[in-house]
Image (cartoon, rainbow, N blue to C red):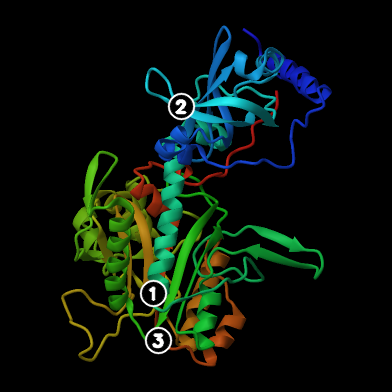
């Protein structure tokens, strides 16, 4: 069996033979008249008319039978059989094709449609043209490849050999389109905010740092568009959203990739309760339009999106599964409990971060059906409003709300899909929150939020009460395509560079 390098050398000789014959191996244009799919769909009309058509695509198979050769060519939509006949093409042209064309080459073929004895719709070729000579052979056993990482590294081959992979990315595009359509119809304005930022903010995450030579200044790739979108609320845009790439210099696992796609939107004069209803409306509409039903299967288990979804207090779910009372336990004691559970804590974390790590390890894996986890501890989200402690605007219960936030997270199948809250618009309180985060940063917690003085100044001009919403697009796509990892729904996920041997 020939090695890949030997095959490449042979194909280079064929390339030279094509060029020596006075042909362009990579021509500028093609004259396609029909896609493969259109040729098949319009067969009943095209075949009786004996009208010549031109189709293009990649050669996927070649089967030679003496003076006849059958092959399949595939474009981006479908595959069709082509019939090369020596008597029709002429001996010289027929031989030239067999000598110099290979599986993987892109070609243009002209001919008429007919149906074979086996009933397969086929194009009888009158003429052909090379469009792109492939120098490397397509792998023979790519489907079911054991080295899954190789599929991610060479996504172009993954797409060629696995139609179901292409379908996932087609669905991904449809999901994003449906999200845009939903928000546009609700009166939201899509905008773009800076990816390079002088101060990173809007989330607890470690950033990527870079340097701008022109201005001799350090910049950061954004970890969230939040603070810029909220500046637009200050500027009078009441409904605003952005779908864009986010960058976080943190760990990689099934739910995390260093760069990913996020939807964030902000809604003036709304609160987290209104936002929960809008979230339900958007997600169930999206699920219906993209899957055609409200119940899907994910990793062998059913998920039913029928609303309303349960609302569970963060402290209640912690207490249910760990017996820990967050109101009574100290930070030091909580850290000890985390240690007992085998949780390794980052340096400098505060009580709310410790509670979140316990929740992620013990509680969240038990949530499969859509569920809102509400009212996280005060330190969890420095940009969220605190629940009001007095007045008739909220219903009291046995849990003290003095250190709870007006927020929710949507969890489905152990995925944190959405993080949302009523936005803090008190500039003095926001300044205090940033100061608390700076203390954590000095303690060594490098994911603490930093103080954005320009944002604080913007708040002092007045920001209307608002609710904000953030959702990981990749996680939602993974769920709706029954994909285990984000790497299955990101076309080119971050991969470790392999050392050359």
Label ID, residue 185:
1
* Residue 353 sits above or below residue 186 on the image: above
* Residue 501 sits above or below residue 195 on the image: above
Check contact, mark 2 vs mark 1: CB within 8 A: no
Q: Nearer the viewer, residue 443 or 274?
A: 274
Q: Residues within 10 Å of mark 3 (few under 14, many from 20)?
A: some
Q: Earlier in the sequence, mark 2 or mark 1?
A: 2
Question: In terms of secondary structure, where does tag 1 sit?
Answer: helix
Identify the residue position indicated by label 3 in the image.
Answer: 465
Single out the mark in the foreground, 3 or 2: 2
Residue 121 in the image: state x and y as whole percent. 43, 28
Residue at the spot x=41%, y=24% of the render? 120
Q: Residues within 10 Å of mark 1 (few under 14, many from 20)?
A: few
Q: Which quadrant holds residue 176?
A: bottom left
Check contact, mark 1 vs mark 3: CB within 8 A: no
Q: Nearer the viewer, residue 471 or 141?
A: 141
Label ID, residue 95:
none
Q: Earlier in the sequence, mark 3 or mark 2?
A: 2
Q: Earlier in the sequence, mark 1 or mark 3?
A: 1
Q: Nearer the viewer, residue 450 or 142?
A: 142
Identify the residue position indicated by label 2 in the image.
Answer: 114
| For residue 415, side relative to residue 454 (left or right) | left
* Residue 126 sits above or below residue 65 on the image: below
Q: Quadrant of the C terminus?
A: top right
Q: How many marks?
A: 3
Residue 197 in the image: state x and y as whole percent. 64, 69
Single out the mark in the foreground, 1 or 3: 1
């Amino acid at each position: 069996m020939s090695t890949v390098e030997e095959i490449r050398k042979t194909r280079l000789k064929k390339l030279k033979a094509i060029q020596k014959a006075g042909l362009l191996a990579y021509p500028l244009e093609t004259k396609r008249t029909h896609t493969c799919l259109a040729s098949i769909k319009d067969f009943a009309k095209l075949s009786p008319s004996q009208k010549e058509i031109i189709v293009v695509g990649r050669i996927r198979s070649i089967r030679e039978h003496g003076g006849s050769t059958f092959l399949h060519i595939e474009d981006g939509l479908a595959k069709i059989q082509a019939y090369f006949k020596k008597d029709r093409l002429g001996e010289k042209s027929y031989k030239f094709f067999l000598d110099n064309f290979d599986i993987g080459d892109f070609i243009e073929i002209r001919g008429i449609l007919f149906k074979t004895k086996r009933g397969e719709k086929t194009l009888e070729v009158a003429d052909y043209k090379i469009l792109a000579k492939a120098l490397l052979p397509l792998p023979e056993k790519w489907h079911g490849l054991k080295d899954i990482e190789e599929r991610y590294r060479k996504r172009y081959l993954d797409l060629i050999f696995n139609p179901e992979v292409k379908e996932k990315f087609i669905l991904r595009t449809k999901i994003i389109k449906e999200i845009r359509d939903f928000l546009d119809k609700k009166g939201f304005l899509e905008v773009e905010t800076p990816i390079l930022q002088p101060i990173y903010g809007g989330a607890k995450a470690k950033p990527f740092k870079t340097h701008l030579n022109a201005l001799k200044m350090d910049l950061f790739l954004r970890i969230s568009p939040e603070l810029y979108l909220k500046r637009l609320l200050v500027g009078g845009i009441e409904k605003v959203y952005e779908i864009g790439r986010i960058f976080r210099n943190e760990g990689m696992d099934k739910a995390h990739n260093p760069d990913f796609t996020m939807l964030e939107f902000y809604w003036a004069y709304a609160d987290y309760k209104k936002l929960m209803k809008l979230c339900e409306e958007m997600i169930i509409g999206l699920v219906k339009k993209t899957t055609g039903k409200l119940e899907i299967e994910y990793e062998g288990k059913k998920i039913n999106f029928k609303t309303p979804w349960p609302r569970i207090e963060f402290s209640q779910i912690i207490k249910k599964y760990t017996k820990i009372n967050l109101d009574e336990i100290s930070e030091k004691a909580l850290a000890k409990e985390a240690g007992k559970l085998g949780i390794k804590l980052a340096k400098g974390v505060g009580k709310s971060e410790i509670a979140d790590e316990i929740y992620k390890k013990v509680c969240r894996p038990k949530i499969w059906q859509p569920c809102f986890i509400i009212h996280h501890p005060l330190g969890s989200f420095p940009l969220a409003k605190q629940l009001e402690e007095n007045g008739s605007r909220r219903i009291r219960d046995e849990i003290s709300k003095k250190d709870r936030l007006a927020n929710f997270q949507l969890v489905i199948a152990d995925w944190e899909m959405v993080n949302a809250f009523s936005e803090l618009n008190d500039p003095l309180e926001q300044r205090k929150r940033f100061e608390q985060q700076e203390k954590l940063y000095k303690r060594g917690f490098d994911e603490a939020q930093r103080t954005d003085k320009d944002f604080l100044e913007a708040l002092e001009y007045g920001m209307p009460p608002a609710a904000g919403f953030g959702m990981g697009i990749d996680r939602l796509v993974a769920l709706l395509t029954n994909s285990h990892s984000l790497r299955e729904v990101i076309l080119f996920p971050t991969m470790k560079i392999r050392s050359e041997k």
